[in-house]
Amino acid sequence: MNKYFLLIFLIFSETVYAKYKNTDGEAIDKSIKDLIRWQRNQSKPILASIDLSEEWKNIDLHNDDNYLIWIGHSTFLIKKNGLTTLTDPVFSERASPFKRLGPKRLIPPSLMINDLPTIDVVTISHNHYDHLDIRSLKKISEKFPEVIFLIPEGDLDIFKKRKITNVNEFNWWQEISIEGFIFTFTPVKHWSARGLFDRNESLWGGWHIMTSDYSLYHAGDTGYSQDFIQTKKKLGSPKYALLPIGAYDPEWFMSESHVNPEDAIKIMQDLDAEYSFGMHWGTFTLTAEDTLEPRERLIDAAKINGIDNFKTLIPGEVIFLK
């Protein structure tokens, strides 16, 4: 969501009671004073279009196996041991309930829905419009009628209204086994809302995907918390972690719900992930940092920490899963 939609949501959805809260017992809730300060001090970011790759055209998406492709923002195509998973699929021009208003893409998706191989599973981290794009999900359900949707608790009505079936809701730590894979919904620090009066009426989280030989982890959208230490204790360390690195400026206002690149490195270390890839940057202008800043800060922070296993990807390039 861009700053205007976020401001409206925060002002009009303030309530004393929140149905869902973070694991620290708190719901992210800004004061009117902070909202006004944030709005008055907004700076305009320097926008840029990051490169795209057509490397995915060099493989057979349908028959090749064990690969990962960043499509953009938080959307990844993951094929592992014959099972194909799509995370937070957003293929629309805008991350918005409206077709002509709201954050517009800086880059197109590296693959379009018609390019996709047969999708077996779709995971949704939470219901913000840059993660739950119901127009894209409807098209995916029509193209792949057998696809299974894994969503947070409280979001089922969104799918029912579009007559999307094969939908499973999850609370934190609930899991499902699909063709030998175990998908577990894990806690992160965030919030939810799609309208003016539904703040925190549904849950938010990450997805831990256990395969026969190792696990992958998609963090969705999150501020820094102790949740990732708990995830490692309960589920073990993932080999691959897909972690957000953008939408953090101004940090005094955004840090509760969006990590910066340095905090993303802490998450990688908490999870003890073998490889990490940055997401949630370079696709939509959601906050005030320059488009390329998250990548630059991640590179600098990785050097300072002596880390060479946390990188950003080019949308469309192919990462072969080891």
Image (cartoon, rainbow, N blue to C red):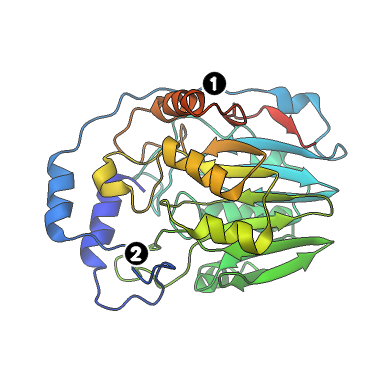
Task: Please say whether residue 90 is visible from this viewpoint.
Answer: no
Rendered residue at 38%/41% (across/down): 247
Q: Secondary structure at mark 1?
A: loop
Q: Amino acid at mark 1?
A: Asp
Q: Amino acid at mark 2?
A: Gly
Query: Where 307 sits versus 36, above or below?
Result: above
Whether the residues at callouts 1 and 2 have beta carbons within 8 Å, the answer is no
Q: Earlier in the sequence, mark 1 or mark 2?
A: 1
Using the image as rendered, state which of residue 62 and residue 114 is in the foreground.
Answer: 62
Relative image position of residue 121 (x, y in whole percent)? 71, 57
Q: Is residue 127 left or right of residue 69?
A: left
Q: Is residue 151 left or right of residue 225?
A: right
* Residue marked by disc 2: 195
Q: Secondary structure at mark 2?
A: loop
Residue at the far right: name it: 63
Rendered residue at 56%/70% (across/down): 172
Q: Which of pointers 1 and 2 indicates the residue nearer the eye?
A: 1
Relative image position of residue 54 (x, y in whole percent)? 68, 23
Rendered residue at 47%/58% (across/down): 226
As drawn, the label of residue 51 is 1
